Image: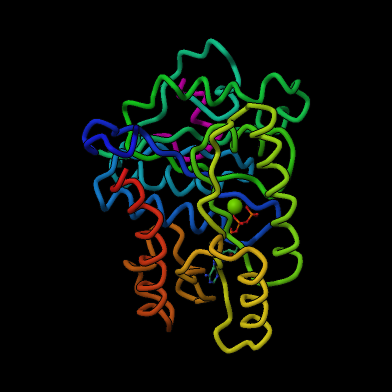
Amino acid sequence: MKNIQPSALVLKMISYVLANQKGGVGKTSVSRHLIFRALEMKLRTLVIDFDPQANTTKTLLHLAKSANPTLDITEPGQVSDAGWLTTARLFHKDSKAQPMPVNEYASLIAADAELVDIADYSLDAIPQPRLSLGKFADQYDVCIIDTPPSQGKLLYAALAAANFVISPCTLDEDATDGLAALFQDIERVRDMEWNSDLKIMGIQINKMDKSSAHDRKALAALRDSVGDLVMKDIIYERAATRLAIRKPVWQGNRGENKGVAAVEMKAACNAILNHVAHQ
Ligand SMILES: Nc1ncnc2c1ncn2[C@@H]1O[C@H](COP(=O)(O)OP(=O)(O)OP(=O)(O)O)[C@@H](O)[C@H]1O
Ligand SMILES: [Mg+2]
């Protein structure tokens, strides 16, 4: 039924979770660029940081400071002190706190120190963030969820809160082997009915080395084993991408590969977000 309705009638927040338990594969870099691109597209964007490292939170606090130079929240720990909703508070049933406004289009649910305690919560807590987010769903077009490099309840809760999983992945064996564990976690989230509709959008290859025969072979092998799940746009290893923390690589002015890095990253982000535009 949904497909035959005019698009204006089915507008609803679409949530993407960036997940891969392997560290350093680009979950945060891709999250940031999706956020930067969504804001350029004037999409009302909710950002949720499930990673106690709080890297995405720091980028968003920087954006908030640029939009409002008098803002006195500069560290992740200050967000909950100021009364704003944080990711750990999403696990509390009755929190009345609101996401922190960042600029005209973005709001943030920041990572906080309490997140490390979630591992001790019971399994019943896993669907709570999804339920807590329900009340904001009509205020945003898109929600971007960054996750930590680990398995367990935090990751389950993040998967439970999303519509689509994107798994950034590098072409080394540890990262590609790790995909099997992620797929098992996704199955579990569906089977436990924490989120039966969770869909895999795809595996976003990141940090590919264009000149490496190993990487080309590994990509071919991955395509053989999971086919269309490997997303078409590849993000290559680029100095300019590594430096793009506070603004997107297509706005940066450092790094010898800025031109190609910009084009590749923007294409990958557009392919993901166009999905929102076409819902
Ligand atoms: N395409 C790229 N080219 C070059 N460097 C990159 C690229 N993508 C990410 N990096 C760099 O690799 C490092 C790890 O990336 P990032 O923090 O995004 O990974 P992550 O999966 O979020 O890590 P963690 O698991 O610790 O959260 C960072 O220094 C980042 O700047
Ligand atoms: Mg990260």
Q: Position of residue 180 (x, y in %)?
A: 73, 55
Q: Which residues are magenta?
A: 72-84
Which residue lies at the image location 51% right of the left edge and 75% below the top edge? 236
Residue 253 percent location from the top left of the image: 34, 74
Indicate whether residue 75 is drawn in magenta.
yes
Q: Is residue 3 left or right of residue 162?
A: left
| x, y percent for residue 155 | 66, 39
Q: Which residue does the image show at 50% across and 52% down from the upper left? A: 201
Q: Quadrant of residue 49?
A: top right
Task: Describe residue 216's horizontal placement relative to residue 106 as left or right.
Answer: right
Looking at the figure, which quarter contains the N terminus?
A: top left
Whether 213 is drawn above or below 162: the answer is below
Query: Which one is nearer the viewer's eye here, 255 or 153?
Result: 153
In the image, residue 65 lies at what x, y percent? 35, 43
- Figure coloring: rainbow
| Image height of 189 relative to 93, above or below | below
**Residue 233 sits in quarter:** bottom left
Residue at image location 40% in from the left, 38% down from the top: 14
